[in-house]
Image (spheres, rainbow, N blue to C red):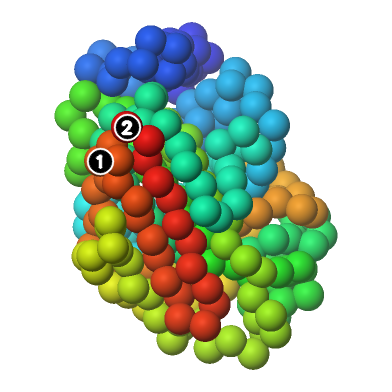
Amino acid sequence: MDQELIDFAVDRLLRVRADNRPLEEIPEGAAPSSLSDAYLVQDALVAQLDRPRYGWKIGCTSKMAQEMSNTNEPFYGRMFADSSFDTPASIPMTGLFHPIVEPEIAFVVSKDLTADGAPYTQAKLLDAIASMHPAIEVVDARYEGGWPLGIVPTVADNGVHACFVLGPAVSDWRNVDRPAIPLKASVNGEQVADGIGANALNDPLNALVWLANAATRRGHTVKKGDVVTTGNICNAPIFAKPGDTAAAEFGSLGKVEITFQE
């Protein structure tokens, strides 16, 4: 994909954010047609957004999410400081079109993860984690057709990341049975879904391993202090509406809550 086409795609994705109107489509021939092209568009989009860094999101780590995106592999995007909050959070619906609430497990990285350290494994990364947290990521389809959305347009639009809510640090996180982490998700006090930690690549730490290898392979560094959220562990999508309060309870790990202002 040449630079002119990358710039054209990025311009369309930036207009969505500036005009607060969903994108009809990127014309055929100008849209990224492969995952590699989609990451080129994502890199250029993130550079143009020029927002303070917060960390990384990983998507499609569950079978449900992969089926929605018609893929068999995860993907990544970036998260930004100005759209990341501590729980409980309250955010405006302005600028959101089709938001989905995703309960997830997040890690804070304690050292730079560079290409020199690859390939990364669970054993290597255990000493590169400062803390583990329950969390919620909100994703949004900024394309007019809404959901479901294929993997290529998803990756191009920065992994459809919208915002992020961080829960409390988990004490003694190394001894937590991560695959068995329980989830109960509710909207306005009514339970709507459940889940389990194993929904994220069988163990949320596996998702961090995947990111460390995938990002460094494309020339990126996961930096010390970055927050990495590892994908939806819920068994069903949770679509948010104005006025909704969504809560995710992760057993003894704690609760994360977000309200969507009307």
> Which residue: 58% across, 43% down?
84
Q: Amino acid at mark 2?
A: Glu
Where does the image place residue 109, in percent across and percent down from the top left?
73, 60
Q: Secondary structure at mark 1?
A: loop
Position of residue 19 in the picture relative to residue 27 (left or right): right
| Number of numbered discs | 2
Where does the image place residue 236, in percent across and percent down from the top left?
23, 63
> Which residue: 22% across, 52% down?
68
The answer to whether residue 2 is seen in the rendering is yes
| Residue on which disc 1 sits | 241
| Residue on which disc 2 sits | 262
Q: Secondary structure at mark 2?
A: loop
The relative height of residue 134 versus residue 1 in the rendered view (above or below) is below
Task: Identify the image quadrant of residue 168.
Answer: bottom right
Question: Quadrant location of the C terminus?
Answer: top left
> Which residue: 51% across, 47% down?
89
Position of residue 145 in the picture relative to residue 215 (left or right): left
Give the distance between the C-alpha atoms of the residues marked 1 and 2, in whole angstroms: 8 Å
The relative height of residue 123 versus residue 236 in the rendered view (above or below) is below
Task: Identify the image quadrant of residue 247.
Answer: bottom left
The answer to whether residue 149 is seen in the rendering is no
